[in-house]
Image (tube, rainbow, N blue to C red):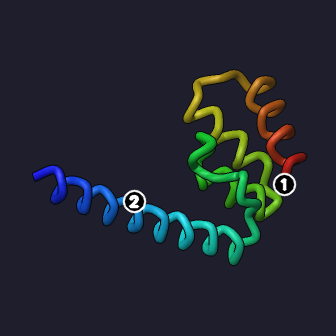
Amino acid sequence: MNTILEQDLMTLRARIAELEDRVTLLYQRLGIPAEANAANGVDSRIFEALQKNNKIEAIKIYRELTGLGLAEAKAAIDELAGKL
């Protein structure tokens, strides 16, 4: 039985690696830096807004997601935009 579980685990790891490669490729094609992804806890809508040079929309989304005030959200988005 352990052999079956180990095979399943190996299959799942290979599938995860394949999906991670595909996500990386998508980020590259969209022009989004690899470090700026959902794994870092940032919603993709924020990146889309920033790519469209729409900081106001990015701040609005950030505030909705976090509940932070305007000044804090603006500072976070400014920092994120600086990394892009």
Residue drawn at (54%, 73%), measured in percent from left and top?
A: 22
Residue drawn at (80%, 43%), measured in percent from left and top?
A: 80
Residue 30, x across and y down, in percent = 69, 73
Residue 59, x across and y down, in percent = 72, 40
61 w.r.t. 33: above or below? above
| Mark drawn on residue 42 | none
Mark 1 closeness class: few <14, some 14–19, many ≥20 residues within 10 Å: few
Disc 1 versus disc 2: distance between alpha carbons? 30 Å
Q: Quadrant of the C terminus?
A: bottom right
The residue that label 2 is drawn on is 13
Three-letter residue code for mark 2: Arg
Three-letter residue code for mark 1: Leu
Mark 2: secondary structure: helix
74 w.r.t. 39: above or below? above
Mark 1: secondary structure: loop
Of tags 1 and 2, which is closer to the observer?
Answer: 2
The residue that label 1 is drawn on is 84
Residue drawn at (83%, 30%), measured in percent from left and top?
A: 75
